[in-house]
Image: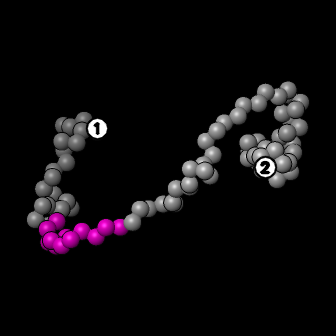
Amino acid sequence: MPKKNDLTAIKLASKNTLQQEDVQTVLPDSTPTTKGKVGRKPKPISEKESGTLALKLTLQELENLREKAGGLPLSTFLKHYLRTQTNLFD
């Protein structure tokens, strides 16, 4: 008796599997269609955000920041705040 996860019990010639001859009838010999890439187009290198920054804050400062973020991730809140409320990156 095969073990629980033994794949030798699977018969390759069962009725539910496609044989090589069946594949030829399902997919006739023709030029394969080429599809475009799937997914979003990559951003230009000038717009990619790859730099990181680490801040050390006191527990009280961190708690105040979390309250002002209102449930947003802190990095998202700080990035938005720095870009919109300051001219630091101009």
Q: Is residue 53 depicted above or below 45 in this figure?
A: above
Give x and y (percent) for residue 23.
16, 65
Please give the residue where the numbered disc 2 appears in the rendered image.
90
Give x and y (percent) for residue 55.
76, 30
| The magenta stretch spans residue 29 | yes
Label 2 element class:
loop
Q: Residue at x 85, y 48 (%)?
A: 86
State the CA–CA distance, disc 2 to disc 1.
63 Å
Q: Nearer the viewer, residue 71 or 78?
A: 78
> Which amino acid is tagged 1?
Lys
Q: Read off the magenta span.
A: 23-35
Give x and y (percent) for residue 87.
84, 48
| The magenta stretch spans residue 33 | yes
Q: Is residue 71 visible?
A: no
Residue 3 figure quarter? top left
Is the magenta region chiefly helix, strand or loop? Answer: loop
Q: Nearer the viewer, residue 16 or 74?
A: 74
Q: Residue at x 82, y 53 (%)?
A: 84
Q: Residue at x 73, y 42 (%)?
A: 75
Residue 17 figure quarter? bottom left
Give x and y (percent) for residue 8.
18, 42
Label 1 element class:
loop
Q: Is residue 32 depicted above or below 62 in this figure?
A: below
> Which amino acid is tagged 2?
Asp
Q: Earlier in the sequence, mark 2 or mark 1?
A: 1
- The image's mark for residue 4 is 1
Front position among marks 2 and 1: 2
Q: Residue at x 41, y 62 (%)?
A: 37
Image quadrant for the N terminus? top left
Residue at the farthest front position: 90
